[in-house]
Amino acid sequence: MADNYLENKYQALQERKAKEQKARQAAWKKRMDAYRKKLQEQEEDRK
């Protein structure tokens, strides 16, 4: 029983870490998209 308990805890930890990583990646993509849009707008203003 102890092994199963630890395996479940470890699996829950891995799932939580995976969700956190996915959230960080989504936030990074959102920031980069906003940055690229800003650069594109600045480039258009120069023309």
Image (spheres, rainbow, N blue to C red):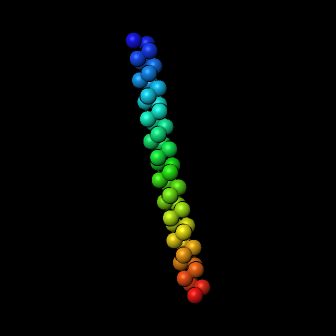
State which quadrant residue 40 falls in. Answer: bottom right
Measuring 54% from the left and 82% from the top, which residue is drawn there?
Answer: 44
* Figure check: 32 above or below 11: below
Measuring 45% from the left and 19% from the top, which residue is drawn there?
Answer: 6
Q: Quadrant of the N terminus?
A: top left
Q: Quadrant of the C terminus?
A: bottom right
* Figure check: 43 above or below 5: below
Measuring 58% from the left and 80% from the top, which residue is drawn there?
Answer: 43
State which quadrant residue 39 falls in. Answer: bottom right
Q: Is residue 36 left or right of residue 8?
A: right
Q: Is residue 45 left or right of residue 13?
A: right
* Figure check: 28 above or below 14: below
Q: Is residue 15 left or right of residue 28?
A: left
Q: Residue 45: horizontal and vertical position, in percent?
A: 56, 84
How many marks the image carries: the answer is: 0
Q: Residue 34: horizontal and vertical position, in percent?
A: 51, 66
Q: Please, which residue is most extreme toward the top here? A: 1
Q: Residue 8: horizontal and vertical position, in percent?
A: 41, 23
Measuring 47% from the left and 48% from the top, which residue is drawn there?
Answer: 23
Q: Please, which residue is most extreme toward the bottom here? A: 47
